[in-house]
Image (cartoon, rainbow, N blue to C red):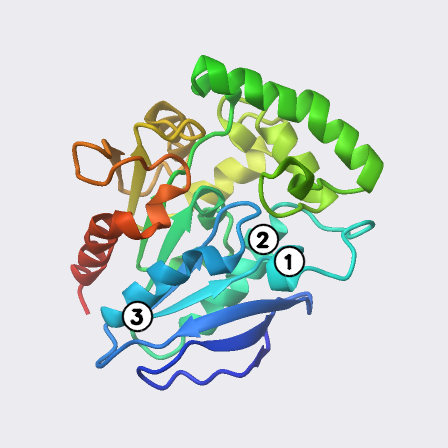
Amino acid sequence: MNTVETDRSAGGMPRQLTLKAADGYPLSAVIYPAAGQARGHLVVAGATGVPQGFYRQFAQYAAEQGYTTLTLDYRGIGASRPASLRGFDMRYMDWAELDLAAAVDHMATDGLPLFMVGHSFGGHAFGALPNHDRVARFFTCGTGAGWHGWMPKTEQWRVRLMWHVLSPLITRWKGYLAWSYLGMGEDLPLGVYRDWKRWCGFPRYFFDDPASAAHMTVQFSRVTTPIVAANALDDRWALPASRDAFMAGYRNSPVRALDLDGPRLGLGHIGHMGYFRRHARPLWDDMLAWFAEHPA
């Protein structure tokens, strides 16, 4: 893995850099240098189709608390998107096995502990990392199995309409999942769409898919990193039952599940995206406090 622009001096403005994955693909990333004495390093593993800028406020806050923080755009997304997604060849798990792996290698270099915060897909990706053992602790938010059966009835109909009517029509027309036409976020490469749709058809995601179950079960069983998995009670895409179905795959990791009642905790509505909005700062404090408990 090669890196361009690797200035990590303490404090100061965020710095853009280009990571190169093991296959040579260039990835847009931003480093937020720690203010004062660095306590550790942090990689943000974002959700499907969510550009890294969405995590800027969290990354800045973590840096202010002493954690040099890196965000990135996976290949095909945001500033890592090619000129055209039509014909862009990739697999969904490339984001984990190649892209996030490059971020981990870049940040795990100077003896300080490395932590990771995941959002949705980020919790799927961690177990697929070839270098997960370089991460001391992992905190993920909104990670679930993706199966419609774990969702409220109204969301089930919406998701079925998306997977079986709208998405096939759009991908056949554009050659990729043009989510922007639906007002649902970033466009997705065709390979991501196909893998995601397939795995969401199983109650335990890729752990139930005959084509991937054996490999993923073995890969995730190798993970022993302590994990916290937080899910909001109003997260229709990743309710606690969905989280539990997926996180069971981390069978050799100590996993602590947190059920977040936003109104009771003073966080208001959280949903699937609110974990990283400013009003969730008390949750951020809990994440960083847990990281700080790790022995230096």
Coordinates of residue 74 in the picture (x, y in percent): 58, 57
How far separated are the C-alphas under marks 1 and 2? 7 Å
For disc 1, the marked residue is 75
Question: Along the line of sight, which residue is nearer the eye, 147 or 173?
Answer: 173
Coordinates of residue 285 in the picture (x, y in percent): 20, 55
- Which of the two discs, 3 and 2, sits closer to the camera? 3
Question: Along the line of sight, which residue is nearer the eye, 218 or 123?
Answer: 123
Q: Amino acid at mark 1?
A: Arg
User: Tag 2: Cα neighbours inside 10 Å, few (<14), some, or many (≥20)?
Assistant: many
How far separated are the C-alphas under marks 3 and 1? 25 Å
Coordinates of residue 27 in the picture (x, y in percent): 61, 67
For residue 116, above or below residue 161 = below
Give the label on residue 95, or none: 2
**Which of the 4 image quarters holds residue 188?**
top right
Of the residues under marks 1 and 2, which one precedes in the sequence?
1
For disc 3, the marked residue is 63
Q: Residue, x 30% and y 76% (percent of image)? A: 34
Of the residues under marks 3 and 2, which one precedes in the sequence?
3
Pick the quarter of the image with the N terminus.
Answer: bottom right
